[in-house]
Amino acid sequence: MKYIQLLLLFILISCKGQNTETMKHKFTNDLIKETSPYLLQHAHNPVNWNAWNEKTLAKAKAENKLLLISVGYSACHWCHVMEHESFEDTLVAQVMNDNFINIKIDREERPDVDQVYMNAVQLMTGSGGWPLNAVALPDGRPVWGGTYFQKDQWINALEQISKLYVEKPEKLREYADKLEQGIKAMDVVSLNTDEPIFEKTYIDEAITNWSKQFDNDLGGMNRAPKFMMPNNYHFLLRYAYQNNDEKLKEYINLTLTKMAYGGVFDQLGGGFSRYSVDAKWHVPHFEKMLYDNGQLVSLYSDAYLITKNELYKDIVTETLDYVKNEMTIDNGAFYSALDADSNTPDGELEEGAFYVWKKEELKALLNNDFELFSDYYNINNYGFWEHDNYVLIRKDDDTKIIEKYSLTKDELAKKKSNWKSILLKERNKRSKPRLDDKTLTSWNAIMLKGYIDAYRVFGTTEYLETAQKNANFIVDNQLREDGGLYHNYKNGKSTNNGYLEDYAATIDAFITLYENTLNEKWLTTARDLANYTFDHFFDETSNMFFFTSNEDKVLVSRSIEYRDNVIPASNSFMAKNLFKLSHYFDNTYFGKTAMTMLNNVKPEMQEYPSGYSNWLDLMLNYATPFYEVAIVGKDAKQKITALNKTYIPNKLIAGSVSDNTMPLLENRFVPDDTYIYVCVNKACKIPVSEVDKAVKLLQE
């Protein structure tokens, strides 16, 4: 990596100050033909933007021109800033158009392309992010890149690179060769031939190491910005309660409470923004992403199941109300995101403009209730942001407010409802954030699972109905006749061959839907999708799965995504799926693959546990008892509903109201009776008919 960085530095220094002559040009922006909201936002730039496709790549080779690849997404604030400063500027556009074939990419539509150039930029600069900008040779191999650039920096860098390509192209080719090797080495996973040993002590040590980074005052990690990282806290929640770790329980509940109180949660309209720029969860980067909200619904639902904390229930209810009102299509699909930026009264795009309040505005709207409101939501130094704006944030729980103002619980609830009604009515008069109205299969599946988990915990039939409608949307629109999935959907059209993340998230959601409905359609579809991934994504050398299908065009690198991030890695998703499916269908190959995958990443897990939380969750299934719960008989559904009222994360559920040949259910149906079979490693305890007795067996 040092060689690569030094070589890049030499290239740029050697060309400093040199300029390329520019020529008159004609604007031919092809993005107007696209459906991605992000690409359409750039459709009227003076830059000759192209979409990423074979035609564009062939054009670069035919004209022997460098590719300029710019990647972003619709809710990305700094993407909009760079567009305004550079891509809308005709002088900048002239430099780009004269010297490059310019490609704009929506990273959410093409995560495969984004991954290649993100890896390249991380190798070159040591960091990454969006907007992501890279220059590549006509064959697609990157030679230079970075993230956000100011206008002058951008012009200077492009002129240097284009000059070098004309005068010393061999230097760029040499650099491309080295960088290509580095990219291909980044996500290589070697087959671990050591015996797979998964012990609780290994997980204990990982958490001890991890806990050094905990913020025990404000929750989350001890740094800013703060991302919610739902999978991290979902795993830690499970570990804490399975092992009765009181200190960890306190930390998880502190984190969940602080996130719920923070400005990162929309205190009026519900739903979470992507992350907080500060340590106290106050000021968010205001974009709202579907995948965050889906995972957080699942997390807060389980947290409520354990604690019965009404705050957690409120968070789930308000988040799902937000998704229903702002993110749901009539056909059952979900939109992708709401932008961070919206128009001010002066017509200027500004981050957070839709969500923030000024004190005088609140006083005029709330009148005599302003004092109480300002105490509750901190219209003071604690809640102040900038430019006389306040972001609503809570500091105290309802009990303290009730005592301080001599209110009853019902009186405070009524006041809060009234405040929200008044302020939402006023807020909705403002220009709303732009909506990214494309549908992504993977993110829909994550939101689908959030709805099922909320149904499991709260029993709200509307949540189940929404989940089933979305699952049917995926089957009817995104599942092809050949058994594969599409990644995108918009305006009645499904596009882009699915990525591993689409299969992994959908399989996970469908298994969960089966466990709560006993409709075997969802379980068999999950199995069929798993079989498809073995045919088209599996790497027999490492026993891991590639991110892209073998039917997709080959990029610079075919990566294996295995480090968990804001969304769990597609391979950790798949390993957990195969673990469960191996139990349901007595499939030893699925089971062996899941174990091998976990063993492959085990050597890295203790060094950076927050990047392997989903893998650690799977390891718990091996290190501690994991139960197969089979419920068979006419009252199976009712007993599953009752069983789900207890937090038992180390189990899977199979069930049937009639005779069934599934391995876990075969020969277990008894007319007029319903029995619960609790099994571990194919050894079953004496069946019981009472749910409370089954729970005791599961908690032994």
Image (tube, grey):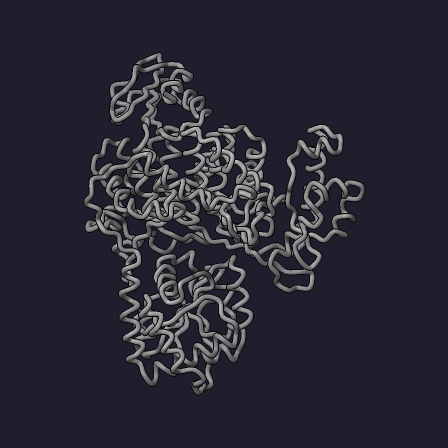
Residue drawn where x is 30% and y is 71% of the image? 176
Please tell me which residue is depicted at 67% across the width and 31% down the height of the picture: 399
Q: How far from the left and from the top, in percent, is residue 20?
A: 43, 85
Residue drawn at the location 56% of the way across and 42% of the way down:
217
Left or right of 212 in this view: 254: right
Please name whichever residue, 499 or 224, is drawn nearer the observer in this view of the structure. 224
Residue lying furthest right: 368
Give the mark count. 0
Q: Relative to 29, is 623 above or below?
A: above
Image quadrant assignment for residue 211: top left
Question: Hey, which quadrant is residue 674 in on the image?
Answer: top left
Q: Taking 621 as reference, is 489 left or right?
A: right
* Residue nearer the viewer, 106 or 303: 303
- Residue 478 position, x and y percent, is 37, 47
Image quarter where the N terminus lies is bottom left
Q: Quadrant of the C terminus?
A: top left
Q: Residue at x 72, y 36 (%)?
A: 415
- Expressed as whole percent of the image width and height from the top left, the position of residue 479 reads 34, 46
Left or right: where does residue 195 sit relative to residue 90? Answer: left
Residue 330 in view in this figure: no
Q: Is residue 136 visible?
A: yes
Residue 55 vertical position relative to residue 199 in the rendered view, above or below: below
Q: Where residue 662 appears, x then y in whole percent?
A: 26, 27
Pick whichever, 546 or 50, lies toward us: 546
Q: Is residue 228 above or below residue 159?
A: above
